[in-house]
Image (spheres, grey):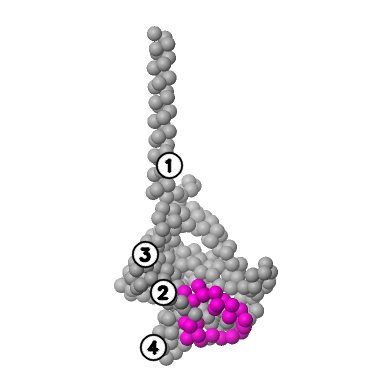
Amino acid sequence: MFWSNQKIWDDFIKDRSKIWTPDEVLTYIKKPYFEPGDGWRYSNTNYLLLAMIITKATKSTLSSELRKHFWQPLHINSACLSIEEEIPDNQAHIFGDNFNDDGSYLDMTFLPRASHESITYGSAGIFITAEDLALWSQSLFKGKILKQQSMDEMLEFVDIGFGRQKKGYGLGLELFKKRFSSGEKAIGHSGANIATGAYMVHFPEHHISVVVMVNNFGRSTAITKDLIHTVLRDKGIIGIIPYFDFIPFGLLMVIVATILLVVILVRIIRRMKRKKRETA
C-alpha cells in the first residue's frame, strides 16, 4: 500500500499540481506484508496495477475504457475520471484542511488536486452523482455488467473479525458488518478522497441500493447507517426493535439472564424453606 509510506505524503504535498506517473508511485512501495496466499490487507496499489494492465492491454486510457464499457451502455452521464477528463464546474463544494494537518477548514473545491488524483489512478478520482452511483450498484448486482461466474468470484469473501466486528472482503467488494446494515446482508464498498466520503451499499435479498456521499471527510458512516435503518424500516424489512448479533452478544445476554433467574429462584426457595422451618 503506497500510502503506508509517509514519504509519498510528504512529496505529494510539496506540489499539488504535479501529475505523477504510475511508475513513480510504485517506487514508494515497501516490502510485502506477507507471502502470497498467507493473508489479506486492503491495498490501493492493486488498483493502480489493474489500471496499468488495462491501459497496456487496450492501448487506450482508463477513462476511455470506463466510458465505452460502462458509462455509455448504462446511460450513466455524470461519471468522469479526473486527470484524464474535464471535471464539471457544478461539483459539490468540499471542506477540509487540504492535508496541512493544521486544524484549518477550507473550501477545497477548486484547489489544485492533480498530485493526489494521479497518485490514486485506478483507485480513486471518479466524479459521479449519487443517483448514477445507485444506478451502477443496481446494474452490477442485477447481473447487467458481469457474467455470473465472474460475479460469483467477486462474492467469495474472506472473513475478517468476529462477532459484532465480523465482515468480509471479496474482489473489490465488502460484506458489511451486520451492525452497520441493521442485521440484513449488505455488500458494496465505502471510500474517501479529498474532504469527501462515500458509501455504496446493496441489499441483494431485497434489491435495494443505498448510496451516500458527504462533502466532509469522516462523516459518511453514521449518516449511511441511519439512512439504511430508515429505509429498511419504512420498507417493513426490519421492526422497531434494534438489531443485535445473537452470537456472541445475544447468546451472552441469554446466559446472563438465565443465571440471574436461577439465582433468584434459589433465593426464593431458600426463603420459603426458612419460613416453613420458622412456622414449624
Tag 2's secondary structure? loop
Please say whether residue 132 is one of the residues in the magenta stretch.
Answer: no
Mark 3 residue type: Val
Instruction: Determine the main secondary structure of the stretch shown in magenta.
Output: helix
Which residue was labeled with disc 1?
253
Task: Give the alpha-carbon distance from disc 2 to disc 1, as whole Å.
Answer: 42 Å
Tag 4's secondary structure? helix
Q: Residue at x 41, y 74 (%)?
A: 32
Q: Residue at x 41, y 71 (%)?
A: 33
Task: Give the alpha-carbon distance from disc 4 to disc 2, as whole Å.
Answer: 26 Å
Which residue was labeled with disc 3?
158
Instruction: Residue 279: name its quadrant.
Output: top left
Residue 161 pos. (x, y %)? 41, 58
Mark 4 residue type: Ala
Mark 1 residue type: Met
Please say whether residue 17 is one of the residues in the magenta stretch.
Answer: yes
Whichever of callouts 2 and 3 sits on the residue coming sooner in the sequence is 2
Image height of 212 relative to 150, above or below = above
Which range of residues does the magenta coloring cover?
A: 1-27
Whichever of callouts 4 and 2 sits on the residue coming sooner in the sequence is 2
> Observer-nearest residue: 8 or 125?
8
Task: Give the alpha-carbon distance from disc 4 to disc 3, as whole Å.
Answer: 29 Å
Which residue was labeled with disc 4?
57
Image height of 165 relative to 108, above or below = above
Instruction: Residue 264: name its quadrant.
Output: top left
